[in-house]
Image: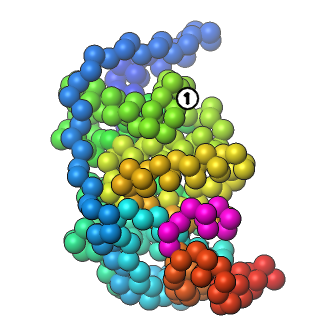
Amino acid sequence: LLHFARGGLMGFVRRLRARKGPGAVRPPAAPLAAVEPLPHRALPARGTPILSVQGAVKRFGGLVAVNDVSFDVAAGEIVGLIGPNGAGKSTMFNLLTCTLPMSSGSVRFLGQDIAGMPQREVARLGLARTFQHVKLRPQMSLLDNVALGAHSRTRSGVLRAGLRLDRAEERQILQEAQRQLERIGLGDRAHELAGSLPLGTQRILEIARALAADPVLLVLDEPAAGLRRKEKMALGELLRKLRDEGVTILIVEHDMDFVMKLVDRLVVMNFGAKLVEGAPAAVRADERVQAAYLGSVA
Ligand code: ADP
Ligand code: MG
C-alpha cells in the first residue's frame, strides 16, 4: 500500500486517472477546515543536557570508523561536528540516531539509554534527522513529504493512515505539515512536487519534514553541501531562527565558513577519533585541526 498508494487509496485512483489524460493536472486540494492542532512537546530549558555520547565505537570489519568518541549536547545550542572526509562523522550520526548499531559505547537522550532502540522510537522521543543525500519523495507534493514526518506523532498506524481510515487525524497531520512549511518559508508552494525544487530548497524541505516530528534535537548531515551561496545563507538564517525558537541542532558540515558563523560549539573528528572540542575561534586556531585539514588536502 505504501508503495503503490502513497497518497492513500483516493490518491492512487486520482493518479491512475491523471495518467490517462496527458494534459491532466493534479487538482488543487480543497481548503481544509481548521482542526485541533497536534499536541506539541515542551522543549527542555536552555542549557539542560539532552544528549550524551559516551565511548562510541563502530567497527566495519577491520575498519574502526568511530573510535571511542564522547561528547554532550545541551538544549538550545547548535553544535557542529566537523572533520576531513572519511573522519567518521556520518557514521557517528548514524550511531547516535540509532540508524546503525554501535559496536560499543552508550548514547543517552533526554535521560534514556537509546542505543539499540528502533529508529522509530528514537524519533518519537524527539530526535529527528536528515541524511547526507536528500531522501525526499520527488513525486509527492511538498505538503505530503512534510506530512510523512508527522505520522510518528499520531496514534494511527501507518496502515490505517495509508487507508485514510482516520480522516480527522489525517487533517491534523496536513495542517501541521502546512504549519511547518510556513515556518520554513514554503507555505505558498505546498502543492508543488518536491522533485521540481532546486537542491537548496529540497534541503530546507527535508528540515521541515524533520520538524514535523516535533523534535527536541535536530540532527543534520551536511545540509549545505552542493548549495549556492545564497541558498547557504537562507539555510543558515533558518537554523538560527530554529535555535532561537528553542530547537537544539547538531550539524555535520564541510563548509568551514558556514559552520564557524553558525555554531556555538564544535567537535572535531579525525580518523574516527575526537580530535578537539571547543568554541569556533579556538578550534580554528588549533594547530591539530589545521594539520588534520591540510593532511586531507594533500
Ligand atoms: P565522514 O562522514 O566523516 O566523511 P563516514 O562516517 O562516512 O565519514 O566514514 C568513515 C569511514 O567508515 C570511512 O572510511 C568509510 O569508508 C567507512 N564506512 C562508512 N560506512 C561504512 C559501511 N557501511 N561499511 C564499511 N565501511 C564504512
Ligand atoms: Mg559524511
Is residue 185 placed above or below 28 in the rendered structure? below
Task: Please identify the residue farthest to the left as the structure is shown.
Answer: 155
Asked which quadrant contains residue 13, the reply is top left
Residue at image position (53%, 66%) is: 263
Verify whether residue 235 appears in magenta: no
Tag count: 1
Quadrant of the drawing holding the N terminus: top left
- Give the residue displayed 44% in from the left and 89% down from the top: 68
Comparing 14 with 216, the one in front is 216
The foreground one among 76 and 109 is 76
Quarter residue 126 falls in: bottom left
Residue in the picture at 33% in, 77% down: 52
Residue 20, image x and y in percent? Answer: 55, 12
The residue labelled by disc 1 is 193
Q: Which residues are magenta?
A: 256-265
Q: Is residue 251 left or right of residue 291?
A: left
